Image: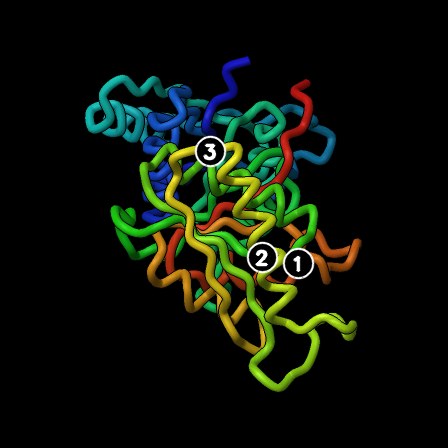
Amino acid sequence: MNRPVVAGVDGSPASLLAAEHAARAAVLRSRPLHLVHGYLHPLGYGVPINPYDVGLPAPTEEAQKMLEHTAVDLEGRCPGLTVEVRQVAGGPGATLVEESRRAELVVVGSRGLGGFAGLLLGSVGTQVAAHAHCPVLVVRPAEEPIPVAGPVLVGVDGSESAELAVGYAADEATRRGDGLVLVHVQPPDGDGPADGGPRTPDAESAELLATAEAAVRGSHPGLAVEARVLRAPKAEQALVEASADAALVVVGSRGRGGFAGLLLGSVSQALVQHARCPVLVARPYAHAR
């Protein structure tokens, strides 16, 4: 199945930048790009003017022109790219989550139309990053151009979610021709063993990083891999700071200390809100329906 790269577009600068990132991702993966505009009824949230009228609202000519103009622009700048545009009657977040069932990757901007200044990541981006059925690329910061230099950075903590993230990060670094940096964050010196056991934080970090590095070198021979230990009270703090020197940071949707009821763990939540480069949330693929 030729899963497409999907980007939600609403005409806002953040969503148009997301579409540009999505076009690049589609070219690197040799996949088609689908630009999707999920629209609500004019009165909001799909409520019809007449409560007894259950008909779906119609797509708008203005939105169609915006989508087609964006497609033409991207095809002109990305030779070989195939773009399909579509309007869907539904909220943008729910629409992209549903589209993710058949997608290779979903790309969202950090804030779209209707976003509030106090929200660093709009509700659509949060909803998609937490509920999508495939990996999600969150394009941030919204005002920055696409990073062209720097490695792919990924956090390692021994969790199943982080293992998935390491695999995705290695794939992405290979596609881009960039290096991969594996990072484990441990408490500052003097904080004692990381897990309360007999092992020191240094020993645990070395073991986690060595295991991850061996797995990457086995599956991606020739990829330049670097392992780093960062010291900080909180992993999210260290990874946000390290993202300033990366072209992309990849994070699992939930780490070793995550709670089952939280769809995004504290580290992934912090990165999609505050990272200084785009963030790939490593979500597993669903079976297409």
* Residue holding disc 3: 220
Please tell me whether mark 1 sits on a helix, a strand or a loop.
Answer: loop
Q: Residue at x 50, y 49 (%)?
A: 250
Return the mark for residue 268.
Answer: 2
The answer to whether 82 appears left or right of 79 in the picture is right
| For residue 185, side relative to residue 74 (left or right) | right
In depth, the one of 250 and 102 nearer the eye is 250
Residue drawn at (73%, 56%), measured in percent from left and top? 262
Give the mark, 3 or 1, whose residue is nearer the N terminus: 3
Amino acid at the residue labelled 1 = Gly
Residue 150 disc label: none
* In this rendering, the label closer to the viewer, 3 or 2: 3
Measuring from the top left, give residue 182's x and y in whole percent.
49, 54
Name the residue: 67% across, 54% down: 158
Image height check: is 17 above or below 189?
above
Inspect the image, locate mark 3, and give the three-letter code of the amino acid beneath it: His
Which quadrant holds residue 46? Answer: top right
**Along the line of sight, the residue nearer the viewer: 261 or 40:** 261
Real-space Cα distance between discs 3 and 1? Answer: 28 Å
Give the residue furthest to the bottom. 190
Q: Residues within 10 Å of mark 2 (few under 14, many from 20)?
A: many
Say which amino acid is labelled 2.
Answer: Ser
Q: Nearer the viewer, residue 94 or 224?
A: 224
Q: Are marks 3 and 1 in contact (CB under 8 Å)?
A: no
**Contact (Cβ within 8 Å) of mark 1 with mark 2:** yes
SS for tag 3? Answer: loop
Q: Using the image, determine if residue 13 lies above or below residue 26.
A: below
* Residue lying at the far top of the rendered structure: 1
Mark 1 lies on residue? 265
Residue 271, percent from left and from top: 51, 60
Gap in angstroms between the C-alphas marked 3 and 2: 25 Å
Gap in angstroms between the C-alphas marked 1 and 2: 5 Å
